[in-house]
Image (cartoon, helix red, strand yellow):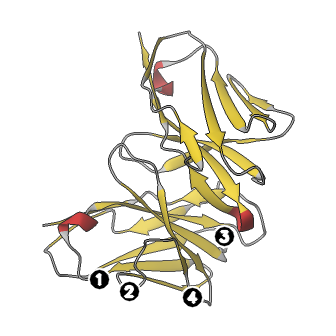
Amino acid sequence: GAVVSQHPSRVICKSGTSVKIECRSLDFQATTMFWYRQFPKKSLMLMATSNEGSKATYEQGVEKDKFLINHASLTLSTLTVTSAHPEDSSFYICSARDARGAETQYFGPGTRLLVL
Amino acid sequence: RKEVEQDPGPFNVPEGATVAFNCTYSNSASQSFFWYRQDCRKEPKLLMSVYSSGNEDGRFTAQLNRASQYISLLIRDSKLSDSATYLCAVNRGSYIPTFGRGTSLIVHP
């Protein structure tokens, strides 16, 4: 099956630092990747849709200057949490959709961010 | 009304039981529907897509009711390993998915 990797899997950082999370599709090309955030016992909240070669589309209420998304190639999207604060602590998950057009999304294993 | 709603549970059932979850959606124009399974502290994994005619995969059966705007998941002969959170996902336009908060299932011996 399709494989999506995320790095790092876990990060602890001090308040005010920026954290970069990478999402890679390993065996397929993904024109579209999605970034989600999930708080404990809550649903996956879509933050933004990342399209290769163009600007990301952010969901209402998500600050684009705080959560910078870059999708520079068909296999890599990055999410940078800028000037992280404790309230940004969460589980961040990416997913990728195969460029060949299937609707199925393949999720990365997620990144646990803890901001102290 | 939320776009996608699920009863969070937990559903506590004995091994071998049959259990069913529903998921309601508000957008009547939704086209694609999915069930995902999420284990604790892990990413969601696709369990099955939900087709208009209903579909079955082993012990799992998914149904779509467009008139009442809900999808269902039936699990027969529950196993301990079925314990997880089951998320439904509904695609709005351009394949952008909206997830429910998930239904927790606990299968006990």
* Identity of the residue drawn at 49% across and 39% down: B102
The residue carrying mark 3 is A28
Mark 3 and mark 2 lie on one chain; the one further toward the N terminus is 3
Circle 3 marks a residue in which chain? A
Label 3 in the same subunit as label 1: yes
Q: What's the residue type where badge 2 is placed?
A: Asp
Circle 2 marks a residue in which chain? A
Q: Decide which of B90, B18 is in the foreground and name it.
A: B90
Q: What's the residue type where badge 3 is placed?
A: Phe
Instruction: Report the disc number at residue A65.
Output: 2
When the figure is inspected, residue A65 is found, relative to residue B55, above or below; the finding is: below
The residue carrying mark 4 is A55
Q: CA distance from mark 3 to mark 1?
A: 29 Å
* Identity of the residue drawn at 55% across and 68% down: A34
Mark 4 and mark 3 lie on one chain; the one further toward the N terminus is 3
Instruction: Report the disc number at residue B18.
Output: none
Picture quadrant of residue B52:
top right
When the figure is inspected, residue B39 is found, relative to residue A13, above or below; the finding is: above
Q: CA distance from mark 4 to mark 2?
A: 12 Å
The residue carrying mark 1 is A82
